[in-house]
Amino acid sequence: MTVKIEESWRQILQPQFDSTYFELLTDYVRRAYQQSVVYPPASKIFEAFNRTPFDQVKVVILGQDPYHEPGQAHGLCFSVQPGVQVPPSLVNIYKELSDEYHLDYSVRNGDLTHWANQGVLLLNATLTVQAGQAGSHQGKGWETFTDAAITALSQQREHIVFLLWGGYARQKSRIIDHTRHLVLESAHPSPLSAYRGFFGNGHFLRTNQYLQQHGIAPIQW
């Protein structure tokens, strides 16, 4: 199981890698990959960090854990690779984008790598999951690790937009410095909740307005 993380993130998160909890987490995850089917592929566990180095992060979108069905998860929250059916939450994300920008996003595939390459950290709070078992690797230590990443961004960077969708993501608001960053919260894009405040939230336009106000290139959604 060969796992590598981008150098700037490795330096930022080294205290986590050196900690006892992370050693226990690593043992758990390694055994899980050896004994059963786990997503994403091991080489993609840190894909969000590898695609979006620490000093290039402009926006953070936080998911809960990876997709747990075959062929979906590839290390970026809400994203699936080309050729994979677009999941319902991402369908709704594209619907909101279509409404905000008056473009037809429904024709796109579900690969959000082009967002990550522009500085959108597509971070799941839990980075691995057992096949067919949503949330199965929660509470094993990943949340401590990803909270450390969010805290580092909050404390060491300025003018990042944090998009917190749904109750789970919104809990992270407390570890973000609202005087240094823009925090936008709404309902989750899931079909179960999108009509309770995700649709019409204007987050994508508001994100780019904020970035431009601070001299930062907008995201080409």
Image: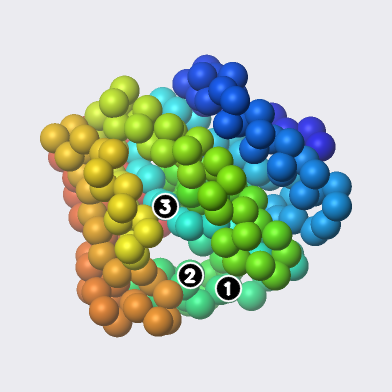
Residue 157: which quarter of the image?
A: top left
Label 2 belongs to which residue? 90
Q: Secondary structure at mark 2?
A: helix
Mark 1 and 2 residues: CB-CB less than 8 Å, in contact?
yes
Q: Quadrant of the N terminus?
A: top right
Mark 3 neighbour density, 10 Å: few (under 14) some (14–19) many (20 or more): many
Location of residue 52 in the rendering, given as x and y in whole percent from the top left corner: 50, 36
What residue is drawn where x is 59% and y is 58%? 66
Q: Nearer the viewer, mark 1 or mark 3?
A: 3
Left or right: residue 2 versus residue 24 is: right
- N-terminal of the two: label 1 or label 3? 3
Structural crowding at the residue carrying mark 1, measured as other residues with C-alpha within 10 Å and reported as few (<14), some (14–19) or many (≥20): many
Q: CA distance from mark 1 to mark 2?
A: 6 Å
Helix, strand or loop at disc 1?
A: loop
Q: Is residue 65 above or below residue 212?
A: below
Q: Amino acid at mark 1?
A: Val
Q: Nearer the viewer, residue 140 or 85?
A: 140
Secondary structure beneath disc 3?
strand
Percent coordinates x, y for residue 80 in the rendering:
61, 62
Q: Which disc number belongs to residue 41?
A: none
Q: Residue at x 57, y 61 (%)?
A: 135
Q: Which residue is mark 1?
A: 86
